[in-house]
């Protein structure tokens, strides 16, 4: 086996991690949304699934998907080397992964009736680990938005106009969803989940495209 072939196989394996990240996140999260008693996606963020007796499932989801993005970032670095955005897109995706791992380690507080038995409304004060969860989530969201726009620049410079537009739209979806949730908009948790998943899916789709070309 030549060195080039070995490198290509390694790159494809790392990119596969990024490809798998979004489906794993979506499937595990959606399964819990549909089965956890008292959970309402229009009121509760997906992070709330980390609380309660079954919270370990979403914690594991955060840790696994974060690790997949960290590995995938290494594949993106190899696949995008020497191209526009080839330096910052992988770095930003790696930060997304680290942010998700941190969000899994530092769990948010029970709130607004979930898990079942929790008083309605938000807690009067937040614990230190809930604050760190919010910080980790914010870092991951900002990095994910930036990664989508950097990938948009990459596609623009390489002449893939449709992909450039789609990449920027994915980043914009997260901006809108997150902004709506932060301003207390109706069903804000749902719009945030849609925005995050859309932006994550774009990174995974980009990794899949690069994997085919590797």
Image (tube, helix red, strand yellow):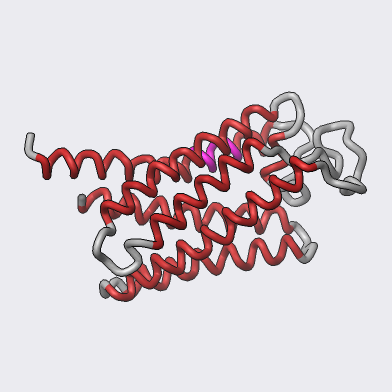
Which residue of the protein is positioned furthest toward the left in this rendering? 2
Work out whether 83 lies above or below 131. below
Tell me residue 83's x, y (percent). 26, 66
Compared with residue 11, is residue 77 higher up or lower down, i.e. above or below? below
Q: Residue at x 58, y 57 (%)?
A: 141
Query: How many labels, in total?
Result: 0
**Horizontal placement of 37 versus 24: left or right?**
right
| Occupied quadrant, residue 162 | bottom left
Residue visible at 60% across and 40% down?
30
Q: Main secondary structure of the magenta part?
A: helix
Question: Which x, y percent locates residue 195?
Answer: 58, 59
Looking at the rendering, the stretch of residues picked out in magenta corresponds to: 24-29
Tell me if residue 193 is in the magenta stretch: no
Query: Does residue 153 appear to the left or right of 42 in the view shown?
Result: left
Could you tell whether 176 is left or right of 91 in the image? right
Residue 133 is situated, as x and y percent measured from the top left of the image, at 69, 45
Judge whether residue 25 is colored magenta. yes
Q: Residue furthest top?
A: 53
- The residue lying toward the viewer, choosing from 166 and 150, is 150
Give the residue at x 53% y 41%. 25
Please indicate, yes or no, whether residue 99 appears anywhere in the rendered image: yes
Residue at image point 32% right, 62% down: 86
Quadrant for the N terminus, please. Answer: top left
Is residue 19 visible to us here?
no
Q: Along the line of sight, which residue is nearer the eye, 89 or 213? A: 89
- Which image quarter: residue 33? top right
Residue 98 percent location from the top left of the image: 53, 45
In the rendered image, the vertical position of residue 88 relative to residue 34, given as above or below: below
């Amino acid at each position: 086996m030549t060195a080039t072939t070995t490198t290509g196989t390694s790159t494809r394996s790392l990119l596969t991690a990024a490809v798998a990240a979004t489906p794993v996140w979506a499937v595990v999260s959606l399964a819990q949304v549909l089965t956890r008693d008292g959970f309402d996606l229009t009121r509760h963020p997906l992070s709330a699934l980390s609380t309660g007796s079954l919270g370990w499932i979403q914690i594991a989801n955060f840790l696994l998907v974060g690790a997949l993005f960290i590995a995938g970032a290494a594949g993106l670095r190899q696949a995008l080397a020497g191209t526009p955005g080839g330096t910052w897109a992988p770095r930003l995706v790696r930060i997304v992964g680290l942010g998700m791992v941190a969000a899994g380690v530092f769990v948010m507080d029970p709130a607004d009736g979930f898990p079942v038995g929790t008083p309605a409304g938000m807690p009067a004060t937040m614990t230190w680990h809930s604050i760190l969860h919010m910080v980790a989530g914010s870092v991951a969201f900002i990095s994910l938005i930036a990664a989508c726009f950097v990938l948009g620049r990459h596609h623009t410079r390489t002449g893939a106009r449709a992909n450039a537009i789609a990449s920027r739209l994915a980043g914009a979806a997260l901006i809108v969803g997150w902004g709506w949730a932060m301003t207390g908009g109706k069903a804000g948790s749902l719009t945030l989940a849609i925005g995050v998943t859309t932006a994550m899916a774009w990174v995974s789709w980009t990794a899949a495209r690069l994997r085919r070309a590797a």
